[in-house]
Amino acid sequence: MSCDLLERTLRSISGIDSKQWAAFGGAAVVTYALYRRFTRLSLDDVPGPENPSFLHGHLPLWQAAEAGVFENDYLTTYGSIVRWKGPLGEDRLWIADPKAIFHILHSADVWEKTASGREMGAVLLDRGLVWAEGDVHKRQRRALTPAFGLSESRALVPRFLLVANKLVDKWKDVIVNEGSGDSLTLDMPTWMGKATLDAFGVGAFDYEFGALDNLDNPLTKSYTDIVYSTFGAPSRGQLLFMNLCRYLPARVIRYIFETGSDPGLQKARENRGHAHRVAKELIQQKREEMVVGRSEKDILSLLVKANDAQDEQSKLRDDEIVAQVRTFMLAGHETVAKTLIFMLWELARRPEIQRRLREEVTEMYEAARARGDEDLTPVDIDNLPYANAVVKEGLRRHGSAIELQRVTWQDDVLPLTRPMVGRSGKTYHHLAVPKGTIVHVSMWGYNLNKDVWGPDAMEFRPERWLEPSNEKTETPLGVYGNLLTFSAGERSCIGWRFAVAEIQAFLVTLIREFELSVPEGRNVRTIRPGIIVPMVIGEEDKGPQLPLTITPVKDT
């Protein structure tokens, strides 16, 4: 591609005119050239595939690859530290090594998110906790932490179970009204997206989205397929532009995303307007409830109460609380929905696992009803060893997030779990990394690393969690089950307990009520628009899909 064509492509994607391009478009090339000129260290000896394209590097291949297959190929062929190419021949590292990941995620003062990554994330997540860096992040996290403790998350389980039971009723009604027998094939992304949005609403905000009831709520509608609509299946040119953004000032990146005419960006801005309006109303409502002495146990009530008790320097401003609300709205339902979808898909493909899980859950339900309870308690759910093994295995094998991007602002040295043999044959016990290097911390790569999980790491096998050595490792990572699914370090997912409780509630409810099976002729693959999205092969034009056949379990 010529320079002129590249310029036209980038201007077309971003929506900026020629004068604006003249003002800052060339900054990418200049910054990149300076970076290459003054980099003192080299990654040339790190094993990795040959560069397929100077312009695009390996990013299009990564984007198009099947989740899990790509990661397993890299681990098998090159190991857990891989040099690959970004655009314009830029050296990057793909990392699935536990010690290297631990070092990166526990060195937030050295390894930060890229400015472009932060701004792209802010399109859907706002400038809340996920966006913040440094002291701002620390202050926000301190203010938010009281709302996400163990007892606070466990207290929400009854609310999650209510929504899960509502989903059961909806499915049974659909079978009666639309099914040709006692079963029906349903699209899981559609249903689980609605259900987890409703569950998140009542759990996090004591707010009714009304998604399962198909209420005419503009905010609810704006969340339909929003990740796929905004970042799904980008063209090679768009992918190139998103990666070249890192050479532009943050304010320029922000301007591009704020003014771009892409339909996905327009939908994201529309969603932001609805989310901010609802967030402001909810915050005001929570404060009014506090004045009259009535405070709910939802996350926003706890956050507002804890924040108002902080000193002026520590507390969040109202605009920051609004940003947190939008962050939670997307991260709190979309990621849970995707993980649940694939968890149910695995059970549908493996009747023996499904059967064992149902037997354990049914036995616990019978015990609960024998003592007079209509539903399970958080303690009951915690005492389901096989169910929790299924949850952990689902989070390991099908975590919704793929990777974390970080960039080092100074030369650094990464420790390695296993010695790395370089392309030259030299053995490395540590790896020197030059300032400005982008690393792709592969959450999926780590969760499939056979050095951590054994030779059957690619298999969905819940039994691994019932074995004595299931969570032992040289380098403990993550906040749950030694998984990287919720990240690690000071930027680990603050809402991981909330997410686990929600997944548990839906899993035990649905598996007790329905048998799941995979309909014939509907083969599923994944795409990677930031999070894992399922598609039916041959029906990609219909957007995200994962059809499963459900049949009510008799005598429940």
Image (cartoon, rainbow, N blue to C red):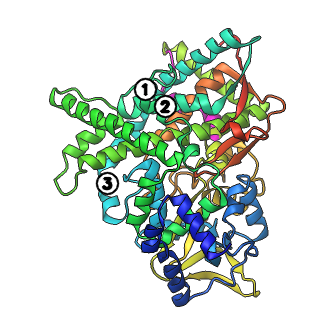
Is 377 contained in the magenta span? Answer: yes
At label 2, which amino acid type do we have?
Lys
Residue bearing the label numbered 3: 140
Asked if disc 1 and disc 2 are in contact, CB closer than 8 Å, the reply is yes
At label 1, which amino acid type do we have?
Asn
Q: Is residue 61 visible?
A: yes
Residue bearing the label numbered 1: 217
| Number of the front mark, 3 or 1 | 1
Give the CA distance from mark 3 to mark 1. Answer: 30 Å
In x, y percent, where is residue 180? 76, 11
Circle 2: is it few (<14), some (14-19), or many (20+) Cα within 10 Å? Answer: some
Q: Earlier in the sequence, mark 3 or mark 1?
A: 3
In x, y percent, where is residue 332? 47, 41
Please report the residue visible at 43 percent of the width from the left and 68 percent of the height from the top: 108
Circle 1: is it few (<14), some (14-19), or many (20+) Cα within 10 Å? Answer: few
Callout 2 secondary element: helix
Instruction: Left or right? Give the position of 447 relative to 255.
Output: right
